[in-house]
Amino acid sequence: MTFTLLKVTVIITMVIVLSIVLLRMLNKQIDKTKFSKVKIDLGSYIKSINLFYANNNRYPTNKEELEGYMSPKLAKNQYKGEYNQGVKKIVAGGSHTIVLMNDGTVKAWGINICGQLGLGDTTDRYVPTTIPGLTNVKDIVTGYWHTIALMNDGTIKAWGRNDFGQLGLGDATDRTVPTTIPGLTNVKDIVAGYGHTIALMNDGTIKVWGNNYYGQLGLGDTTDRYVPTTIPGLTNVKDIVAGCWHTIALMNDGTVKVWGNNYYGQLGLGDTTNRTVPTTIPGFTNVKEIITGHYHTIALMNDSTVKAWGQNYYGQLGLGDTTDRYVPTTIPGLTNVKDIVAGHYHTIALMNDETVKAWGDNGYGQLGLGDTIYRYVPTTIPGLGQF
């Protein structure tokens, strides 16, 4: 009797040990797919493993194989864990990268000469490093050497280079840790140019600060601002974007206002004269979305066509040549566009069929076309689609 009980105890112990070993093996696989730190119901997990074995005569080797055998509750916990540990948004400055995680924390790496990583020093980082104490972040943007975080409570934290007052903290001193902009609340959205920052407020107005050499703050002059300053008379703004030294506002009625540097005609006003106040692009309506490169501007229209203007040295306007345009110009043959983005000198369009087209500067292969030849018209990236 004692021997039989001993055998049973040994067998039960072996099953438990084997299950724990398998669980650890699976958790290692789960870690690689951002399932780390998920609370696991061990009993349910073992049942899922046993059910898999009964149907396949082997044990699972990764989490994908096990998903169909998990209880709905366990599966829900798994996916919740994956969501909380995943990446929500990635942005890049001049030479630094910032990642907003789904749990509201932020990771940073790259050059840190001005403290733009927010890690309390000016030491470069070569791997993603969590910014300590920074939580509840809703959105994040970067200028060339500064970083801005929009918090869940509608306030803003800023860090990095501040020579033009682009941090909005009332001085020109760099910050190496996220620092709250005093008195700034009810912010809906934020964008940043090379050295200026813009906040869209919940009431549809705009506050600006930082470099204003070209009038990119829209305040009627070229004086830098060190604290958030409201643009007078500008209301009913739906969205904002910033180029290197110019700023664009998409209005609720589908029209567009522009200001700042206009050397290449990137304001779309028919000339190359800078503007220091928001100026409506005449006859331009039905705009769905606006994006900018360094010196060129792209508009996605409500009918899914695209208009482009500004610098075209690299063919980034997609118009078949390298001539700058001073007014919004339709890219011929480009329809059914779902979304669009721009680098400094190149442009990428996601189509409704989930294929991708690219054009402009390709000196480093940034168009994904297998070579380093510039493209002057939208060109489909082969094999890329069905996301």
Image: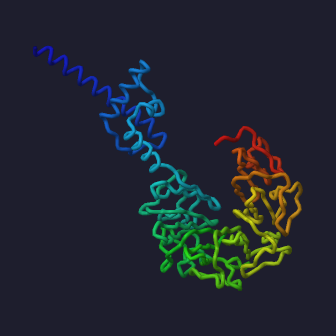
- Residue 208 in the image, given as x and y percentages of width and height: 61, 77
Vertical placement of residue 36 versus 215, above or below: above
Left or right position of 188 against 361 = left
- Determine the image quadrant of residue 276: bottom right
> In the picture, which quadrant includes the C terminus?
top right
376 is higher (above) or lower (below) than 213: above
Q: Is residue 126 above or below residue 236?
A: above
Picture coordinates of residue 24, whole percent (x, y): 37, 34
Number of numbered discs visible in the structure rendering: 0
Residue drawn 49% across the image and 71% down it: 154
Q: Position of residue 282 (x, y in %)?
A: 81, 75
Vertical order, 212 against 36 (above or below)? below
At 62% from the left edge and 61% from the top edge, which residue is drawn? Answer: 93
Indicate how the structure is coloured in the image.
rainbow
Q: Is residue 85 visible?
A: yes
**Toward the viewer: 244 or 279?**
279
Instruction: Using the image as rendered, state which of residue 195 and residue 317 is in the foreground.
Output: 317
- What residue sits 86% from the left and 66% below the top? 325
> Considering the image in quadrants, where does the N terminus appear?
top left
Does residue 314 show up?
Answer: no
Horizontally, residue 274 falls left or right of residue 166, namely right
Q: Position of residue 117 (x, y in %)?
A: 53, 62
Residue at 40% over, 36% down: 27
Toward the left, the furthest residue is 1
Of residues 370 and 201, the one drawn nearer to the viewer in this rendering: 201
